[in-house]
Amino acid sequence: MASSPQILAQTNPLPGDIDGYWAAGCINELARRGAIVLNDLQPAPPDGPSLDLARFYPNAPATWEVVTTMLNRSFPTEAAYGGASTLETALGLASPVNMLYTFPAEYADPGRAITRGEAVTAIAAKAQLPYVARANELLRESLEDGDRVPPYAVEGTAAVLAANALVSSENPRRANSFAPITRGEVAALVCAASPDLQLRVTIAPARHAVPATLAAQAEPTEELRGVWLTNIDSEVLFSRDELAAGIQRLKAMNINTLYPVVWNMGYTQYPSAVAERYLGRSRRLWPGENPPFEAAQGDRDMLQELIELAHAADMAVIPWFEFGFMAPGDYPLHETRPEWFTQRRDGTKDIPMGNEVFTWMNPFHPQTRGLLLGMIDEILANYDVEGVQVDDHLGLPVDMGYDPYTVGLYRQEHGGSAPPDDENDAEWMRWRADKISQFMAEVRQVIDLRQPGGILSVSPNPYPFSYMKYLQDWPTWEANGMLDEIIVQIYRNDLERFVWELNKPATAEARKSTATSIGLLSGLKNRPTDMDLLTEQLEAVRDRGYAGVSYFFYQSLWSWSNEPLAEREQQFQTSFSQTAARP
């Protein structure tokens, strides 16, 4: 439970060494409240006041110990979240969604004198100031040295600036992130960032940096602008007329890449000889058994139609193997090929997701691997596409892998020892994740042999969640040169968690060497996404230098929204007013 800031009696001594100091009013008010520690530096500096006075030493360097003490006495403090860093624990940060999450742990020595950038970031985290969508741009436009704020301090400095709380004893138009900060300057920043007006007004307006008013954000000339096309809660794939109208609608908002589903709910959405051989059925475009509709489709090839229409509109087509190794709970193969499926240690296989129940095909079994590799090879051989995509389902739930085949394979490679009972055992997790990585290397090989230059795109969950939940070690895939394109799914319904996810180390690192974009949730049937939030998320992606965005999914761009359709269409067209090449 959160504790209130410590406020002591008005009889607390006031410091006698701040006469004439620019933030004297702030320091006195903090002293009255017991938010600062007096007389903690001994002996007194040679030119300091006599020992009979309470002293604050405003010009002495501030250490992390001084800062955490001042912040904990000035803002509510809670028990730190599990897994918090040393500094997050010292500050009582209850959620990892804070601006110190990626702060280097080795910088948190309590006795170390710190910089302005460090102090400002800590204050932003402790005061729970909101993230700024266009943080880098705000810093550049507002401050003389805004382009020199270190990466770990960008979010915090922008948040403090946007809150009109970035104050300075000298030039307010400079962040001076690398300059040592004094105790008096920390106190001034605390007062300026406080929700208490009585503290805020102690700092003169002339000491505040003024946040710039930003013009419309510039559009990149190279940018991924993708849309996933599904056969769930959407009919865009079910006729050529719907496809033609949909692609023209997307062309009007300058979309340049389509990701049509070709493998979900255990079936292909295109005529597949591989599926016919493995599954006994070459295609099921409609999501469910609906013979009259399927019969009406005749010999229609949705994928071929889409490719022709999209290429005529200058859009790339990257077929999306949505389900990876996931399978429906009522899959006929459970009866005919039970050895293809994996299970938990207790033998259960069902995976509830929403109103559906799914299972998981064994990613280590040669026939299930052959099925997926065969379909990928088939599409590259038969269709004029730019590449293929797999997503977060190309992995294995961490509690799975206790089926007889996998147990036997593990024993074979471990001198007869069985897998650990603990599904989260580090070596057991690594062994399974490495096997999945080996499969991805096989996917890469198929592409290189069948279509040299073809794109291998992956759309994972953020790391480390992708690894801890699904044993999907996509940063290793990227580091080993397997991937041409990454679209990290950051489906969040607020800007705070969204930007925090953007700054995850694995995502930020990947963009240095591989075109890395962000997946945005444009809405679900029962969960619309407000247009203002989608616009802010796009701005945040562009501001932080990612390669672009892809929207999940087509139908929710327009339907189930809280705004009028015309308003959403207008905003998308404003956000993408010019054409852009794929990165």
Image: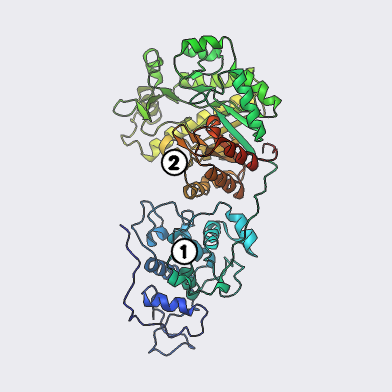
Residues packed near mark 1 inside 10 Å, few (<14), some (14 to 19) or many (20 plus): many
Q: CA distance from mark 2 to mark 1?
A: 28 Å
User: Which class describes the residues within 10 Å of circle 2: few (<14), some (14-19), or many (20+)?
Assistant: few
Q: Is residue 73 above or below residue 382?
A: below
Q: Amino acid at mark 1?
A: Ile
Task: Please identify the quadrant where the N terminus is shown.
Answer: bottom left
**Which amino acid lies under the numbered mark 2 shown in the image of this protein?**
Phe
- Toward the left, the furthest residue is 346
* Residue 177 percent location from the top left of the image: 57, 65
Going by the image, does 346 lie left or right of 441? left
Residue 129: horizontal and vertical position, in percent?
47, 58
Q: Nearer the viewer, residue 342 or 18?
A: 18
Seen from the viewer's position, the closer of residues 534 and 434 is 534
Of the residues under marks 2 and 1, which one precedes in the sequence? 1
Place of residue 470 in the rendered image (x, y in percent of width and height, measured from the top left): 43, 34
Q: Residue at x 63, y 27 (%)?
A: 247
Looking at the rendered structure, which numbered label has been put on residue 188? none
Q: Is residue 163 left or right of residue 345?
A: right
- Give the answer, above or below, for where 505 lies relative to 225: below
Judged by depth in the image, the label closer to the viewer, 2 or 1, is 1
Residue 204 horizontal/vertical position (percent): 53, 75
- Labelled disc at residue 465: 2
Q: Are marks 2 and 1 in contact (CB under 8 Å)?
A: no
The residue sitting at 46% across, 72% down in the picture is 187
- Residue under numbered circle 1: 123
Q: How many marks?
A: 2
- Can see residue 484? no
